[in-house]
């Protein structure tokens, strides 16, 4: 009887200590740093760069994300970051650096991730205090130059 009781307690204790997928901590954000973009009159005209750091995939990140396209048109439909693990999309269509939605989606992995964020330079007055800062004609052959001040947290 003592043996049976001890075995039952031991089994219950090991069951409680066993890791489950519910115990794994999933972060609900991706960090974006070194985020800047500019556009000019020469082809292709638009350039965007940022660095993705994903706490759910520390082995794959940080990774650089770079896009080059004709400003006023949509970038390549299935553009990806340099490690090919994140799609870069603009769900509202052609990018106007003063107001656009950036979407990132994880391509592979056990934790599905997809997030969007609206970026506004406050050119239309709708985003006071924004950290997405744009300047028109900052230097020759650059029509607009923008950068994000600090780290952007993209919810996924």
Image (spheres, rainbow, N blue to C red):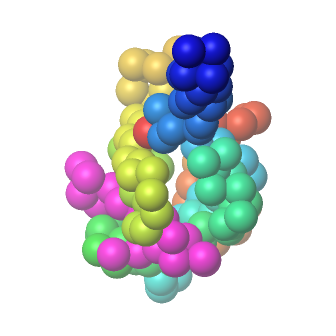
| Left or right: residue 77 compared with residue 22 | left
Asked if residue 135 shows in the view, the reply is no
Q: In terms of depth relative to the viewer, which is nearer, 13 or 49?
A: 13
Asked if residue 17 shows in the view, the reply is yes
Image location (x, y in percent) of residue 92: 24, 49
Image location (x, y in percent) of residue 147: 67, 46
Q: Which region shows up in magenta?
A: 78-96
Rendered view: 80 above or below 125 = below
Q: In terms of depth relative to the viewer, which is nearer, 141 or 91?
A: 91
Q: In terms of depth relative to the viewer, which is nearer, 19 or 56?
A: 19
Residue at the front extreme of this rendering: 1
Image location (x, y in percent) of residue 60: 66, 66
Residue at the spot 45% in from the left edge and 58% down from the top edge: 110
Residue at the bottom extreme of this rendering: 43
For residue 51, what is the image quadrant? bottom right
Rendered view: 144 above or below 45 = above
Residue at the spot 47% in from the left edge and 20% down from the top edge: 127
Residue at the spot 47% in from the left edge and 83% down from the top edge: 44
Quadrant where the C terminus is found in the figure: top left
Q: Is residue 147 magenta?
A: no
Rendered view: 97 above or below 121 = below
Quadrant where the N terminus is found in the figure: top right
Q: Is residue 81 magenta?
A: yes
For residue 38, what is the image quadrant? bottom right
Image location (x, y in percent) of residue 56: 60, 48
Residue at the spot 45% in from the left edge and 51% down from the top edge: 111
């Amino acid at each position: 009887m003592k043996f049976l009781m001890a075995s039952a307690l031991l089994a219950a204790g090991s069951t409680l200590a066993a890791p489950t997928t519910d115990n794994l901590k999933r972060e609900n954000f991706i960090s974006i740093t070194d985020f800047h973009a500019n556009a000019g009159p020469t082809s292709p005209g638009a350039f965007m760069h940022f660095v993705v750091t994903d706490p759910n995939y520390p082995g794959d990140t940080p990774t650089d994300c770079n896009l080059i396209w004709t400003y006023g048109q949509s970038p390549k439909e299935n553009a990806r970051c340099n490690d090919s693990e994140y799609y870069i999309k603009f769900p509202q269509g052609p990018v106007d650096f003063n107001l656009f939605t950036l979407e990132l989606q994880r391509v592979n992995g056990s934790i599905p991730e997809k997030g969007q964020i609206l970026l506004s330079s406050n050119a239309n007055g709708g985003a006071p205090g924004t950290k997405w800062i744009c300047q028109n004609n900052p230097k020759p052959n650059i029509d607009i130059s923008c950068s994000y001040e600090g780290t952007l947290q993209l919810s996924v």
